Amino acid sequence: MRRYGKNPDEDDIRVRPNRKGNRPRTHIRPKHEDAAEGMVLTVDRGRLTVLVEDRIVMAMKARELGRKAAVVGDRVAVVGDLTGKKDTLARIVRIAERTSVLRRTADDDDPYERVVVANADQLAIVTALADPEPRPRLIDRCVVAAYDGGLEPILVLTKSDLASADKLLETYSTLDIPYVVTSREEFTDGAELARVHELLDGKITAFVGHSGVGKTTLVNALVPEERRRTTGHVNAVTGRGRHTTTSALALPLAEVGGWVIDTPGVRSFGLNHVDPSRVILAFPDLEPGTEGCPRGCSHDEKDCALDAWVADGHADPQRLYSLRRLLATRERREDD
């Protein structure tokens, strides 16, 4: 057997060739310092459309991102072909830290949460006052998800020509949630549309609502150049509409600035992922009163310090009632 001396650099040492003919793998990844910044507009089966400057670029997620997924609203770094021409493909190599997230689970027993939208400023909760009937428990769940994810909730009540909005607005009056009431007849004259524009001015707003409430019709009116097929049917037996939006889509608001993100109609909104301690942060008049609460307090139990806080006049009792109603909705189904 040939024995090599102390010098391992002899010319006759055999080196096993790389049979694949490629370079050996390395754990050192490129930094992509020249990557362009963009915003994700749509996600469809692994392909993402990204707005880079004034161009729409088709992209896919780079392998080094692993399981981390980009969603509509994400700010991303993109490399590759950024021309936006047909049949070109770029790569998303970084996802910026998110300022807010709208998350939901399939139901309250589902341990897997799904991020629906990232970096939105507001959550517009669209509900019809009739045809179909409003579902307050679903509204409550959307409000909780907004507070938990760092979004400001707003109410958009449609079809006021069929029923009054007074009773529903009274339910949420202590939460100081901005709202707008629209009707099918008056919405076409532009006055109500202008009021909606005021709420959306310069903001990124995600729209959510169950099928048949007129959400997509509203989005089409706000962004007419991006018209999409509206919900034309509400089941007379179930009161539920037919889904017309199958994936989230970000659309620019040219008149007032900002963005509208249309999301698929929801039949349920699971809150298994929500930490009650984050919901209380949306009640700045009540949050200081939790300092005396026992560890892990649900804020709806015998030893909760919020009862004494309200009794001492630090906050309106109706505010505590609203907080507890929202927290309790995690234990109830939306259609109760």
Image: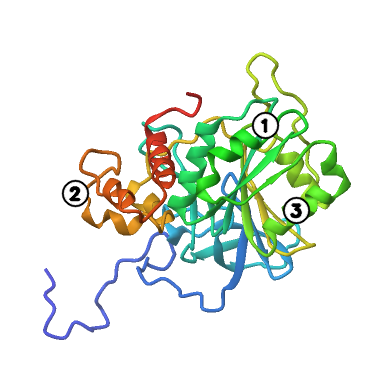
Is 59 situated left or right of 281 in this image? right
Where is residue 320? Give x, y as percent. Answer: 39, 45
Q: Earlier in the sequence, mark 2 or mark 1?
A: 1
Marks 1 and 3, the one that precedes in the sequence: 1
Instruction: Give coordinates of residue 242: x percent, y percent.
Output: 68, 27
Where is residue 45 drawn, in percent x and y? 58, 44
- Residue at label 2? 294
- Could you tell me how far apart the alpha carbons at marks 1 and 3 are, in whole angstroms? 18 Å
Q: Is residue 226 visible?
A: no
Image point 58% across, 55% down: which residue? 122
Residue 240, quarter of picture: top right
Estimate the x, y position of residue 85 in percent, counting from the top left: 75, 62
Q: Are marks 2 and 1 in contact (CB under 8 Å)?
A: no
Against 56, residue 164 (above or below) is above
Residue at 50% across, 60% down: 62
User: Which residue is disc 3 drawn over?
Assistant: 195
